[in-house]
Amino acid sequence: MIRLDRVAFRYPEKQVFSGLTLELPGRGAAALMAPSGYGKTTLLRLLAGLLQPDGGAIRGMEGRKCAFLFQEDRLLPWLTAEENVSLVSNAEAARHWLAQMEIPDGKAYPREMSGGMQRRAALARAMAFGGEVLLLDEPFKGLDEALRSRVARRIRGVFPLTVLAIHDPEEAALLDAQIIHLDAQ
Amino acid sequence: MNKYVRRGLVGLFWIGVWQLLAMAVKLPLLLPGPGDTLRALFRLAGTASFWQSTGMTLARVAAGYVCAVAVGVVLAAACHRFQWLEALLSPVRTVIRATPVTSFVILVLLWIARGRVPVFISFLMVLPIVWTGVQEALRAVDRDLMEMTRAYRFTRMQRLKYLYAPSVRPGFTAACMTGLGFAWKSGIAAEVIALPALSVGGNLYNTKVYLESADLFAWTLTVILLSMALEAALKAAMRGRREKP
């Protein structure tokens, strides 16, 4: 179980959370849903340890390795897809996950790839990185329906825990994720 | 039209303009023509001191330039990392930029041997260019990518190699290219004032003393040709190191 206890966080220009209390399952998949600007991305970054809360505590994430698929693909533009993925893992894992994500040409640079392919390359990187928690911020952005299902099938259950931020409840269903409405907390 | 042919034609046009002007002035002492200049250049090129002077000037400028690039990169990285250092050193950079080269040359002549003055002056003129260029490039490194390298636990070496070096490379290259011209010009200007033995600047000074206008043009042409060759060599070296974006 992961527990957020009265978590407060603010950016210099905006208070995002002021006393958020929330429980996430320790295993399986959880989908965070809330209107835009509510703080889903911030919450994922807090879970990953990329941000520190101003107040309160996050329990259950200590020492857990997180793989993070950001809202933006954040691929290094001067490296090929395969180099981007193998940089966080190894060549074999990179080739495996690029194939799983249906990227036929690992030698392509990000600018030579479509938006959907870049998304899948970023997802391949997260999968190849491994760990205990997979954090996905709008993972299916730019993917068509058929591709979403195939990609979801391949990533489902690979990590002990998957937490995703989404807008569409159907995306939660693809990963059998328990929906958590942040705005109801 | 092929770009080399076009460039050749442009060059020929301006040489023609130069020749016409020289013919109009009719005084080689005031304006030697292209023929006078080439004859002077061939005569000078036949002497050992021409090559020795050119070689020594090249060595002095190169020494100052290389030191400035190295120190500039270190200062940029240090000032980017430590804000207090940036606050402490930025007035120094401003002063170096604002002070005329000649003031520095005369001042430095009091402190160090005249042979080293051009080295120091080249160093001083290039330093703020590389320092600023690299520091600005460091400031512009994509913050999202920086966060990504933290999330994926890149080592310091991986960050340096795969994030910082490629991000900074365009700014660094531009600063190096700009700095090269400055190093060359300021180094020779320092030689003209400091008059070290065996130097292009010293020879330029002598042409003024002895009113040898054709030699002045020949030395100037040498400087221009060397500057162009160095720039082309640096461009080729930078292009060779650049990875596909």
Image (cartoon, coloured by chain):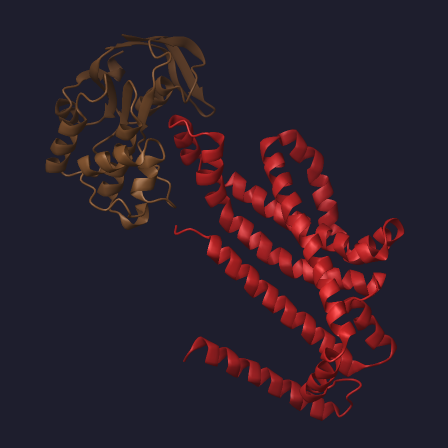
Chain colours: A brown, B red
Front residue (pair A173, B61): B61
Name the outermost residue toward the front: B48
Viewer can see residue A38: no
Q: Position of residue A165 (x, y in %)?
A: 25, 24
- Check the picture and name the quadrant holding the C terminus of chain A: top left
Residue, x 40% and y 19% (percent of image)?
Answer: A49
Viewer can see residue A52: yes
Q: Position of residue B119 (x, y in %)?
A: 75, 55
Q: Position of residue B26 (x, y in %)?
A: 75, 92
In the image, A26: left or right of A4? left
Q: Is residue B131 above or below residue A88?
A: below
Q: Is residue B188 above or below residue A20?
A: below
Name the outermost residue toward the right: B110
Q: Is residue B64 above or below residue A65?
A: below
Dividing the picture into quarters, in which one does residue A15 lie?
A: top left
Residue, x 30% and y 22% (percent of image)?
Answer: A40
